[in-house]
Image (cartoon, grey):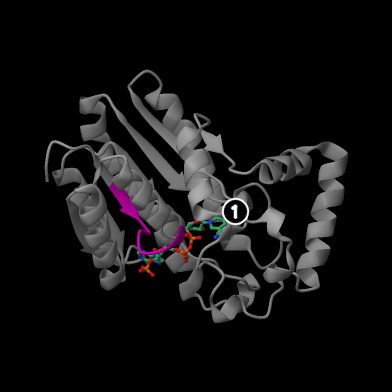
């Protein structure tokens, strides 16, 4: 590595994580790129090196496996303190809890909760000693409300929002900042799975979708601890938290869920 600041990005092989990695490389950060698909990470590493002259380490690991989490945590703890720690690795799953393959919630809890908590714990001593750095954990609008068939997904994202709030209370005045970034519909590979093929996300009008790049720009510019990118998404969160409108909206969302819209 070098005297350039370091950014560690999980989920860097696609979508929001890849957009964070590209943007942070353009800003002159060396990169540690984490995901399972090594060839994608290597392609991104080559691109970042050629375009921006930054150094990149590819760490191809499965962050839903305790051993994989441990190995990545060791890379983070033993490396230079990151200027950015971004956890974007994640996946969606739709299904009634009692009918899910029991491996699915276990995998999701490991990837969405255990991995970021352990990576933050590994990075923090160095970041605190350096008195600088930003932790961005990619959460979801789903952390603010849930419906049938999204139980575990919403619960893991609500965990991240609460975790970051407590953490930021501890970090106040240290120079290190923690944020949960809660996107709504974002055009990535997230919904390109057989599990979602039958649902009607693509009928949602264009104005309700964001690009991964727009999510990243808003996230980097924000100072809110729990930040929702996109004005339409912020409106939805405010509306859902309002007493009367919120109840009506939750009922409408539950009906849309039962009817297979999402
Ligand atoms: N897209 C949306 O509409 C949306 C909305 C709200 C929140 N989010 C959140 O945004 C985050 C990023 O998702 P995305 O939209 O960018 O989706 P994506 O394009 O599917 O990217 C997901 C990333 O996670 C990595 N990943 C998945 N399982 C992994 C594992 N076991 N170990 C290590 N890495 C793993 C994938 O890489 P490999 O397959 O190479 O491992 C990929 O890089 C997720 O946490 C998601 O919950 C997305």
Give residue 133's position: percent from left, percent from top. 31, 32
User: Of all residues shown, which one is farthest toward the top?
Assistant: 173
User: Of all residues shown, which one is farthest toward the left?
Assistant: 2
Which residue is pictured at 54% across the width and 66% down the height? 92
Report whether 125 appears left or right of 114.
left
- Write the start and end of the magenta stretch as one range: 8-15
Give residue 114's position: percent from left, percent from top. 38, 54
Q: Is residue 240 above or below residue 254?
A: above
Give residue 137's position: percent from left, percent from top. 44, 46
Residue at the spot of label 1 = 210
Q: Is residue 174 above or below residue 182?
A: above
Quadrant placement of the C terminus? bottom right
SS at mark 1?
strand
Which residue is pictured at 45% across the width and 56% down the height? 112
Give residue 83's position: percent from left, percent from top. 28, 36
Which residue is pictured at 53% across the width and 42% down the height? 161
């Amino acid at each position: 590595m070098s005297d350039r600041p370091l950014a560690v990005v999980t989920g860097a092989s696609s979508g929001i994580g890849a957009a964070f990695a590209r943007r942070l490389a353009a800003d002159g950060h060396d990169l540690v790129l984490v995901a399972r698909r090594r060839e994608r990470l290597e392609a991104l590493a080559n691109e970042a090196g050629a375009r921006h002259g930054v150094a990149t380490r590819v760490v191809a690991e499965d962050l839903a496996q305790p051993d994989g989490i441990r190995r990545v945590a060791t890379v983070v703890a033993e490396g230079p303190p990151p200027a950015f720690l971004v956890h974007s690795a994640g996946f969606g799953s739709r299904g009634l809890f009692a009918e899910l393959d029991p491996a699915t919630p276990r995998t999701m809890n490991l990837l969405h909760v255990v991995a970021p908590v352990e990576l933050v714990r590994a990075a923090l001593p160095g970041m605190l000693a350096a008195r600088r750095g930003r932790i961005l954990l990619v959460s979801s609008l789903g952390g603010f409300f849930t419906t049938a068939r999204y139980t575990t997904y919403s619960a893991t994202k609500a965990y991240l929002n609460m975790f970051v709030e407590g953490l930021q209370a501890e970090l106040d005045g240290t120079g290190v900042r923690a944020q949960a970034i809660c996107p709504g519909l974002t055009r990535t590979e997230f919904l390109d799975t057989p599990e979602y093929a039958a649902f009607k996300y693509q009928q949602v009008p264009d104005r309700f979708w964001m690009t991964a790049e727009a999510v990243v720009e808003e996230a980097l510019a924000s100072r809110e601890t729990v930040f929702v990118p996109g004005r339409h998404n912020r409106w939805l969160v405010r509306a859902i938290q309002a007493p009367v409108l919120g109840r009506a909206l939750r009922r409408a969302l539950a009906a849309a869920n039962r009817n297979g819209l999402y």
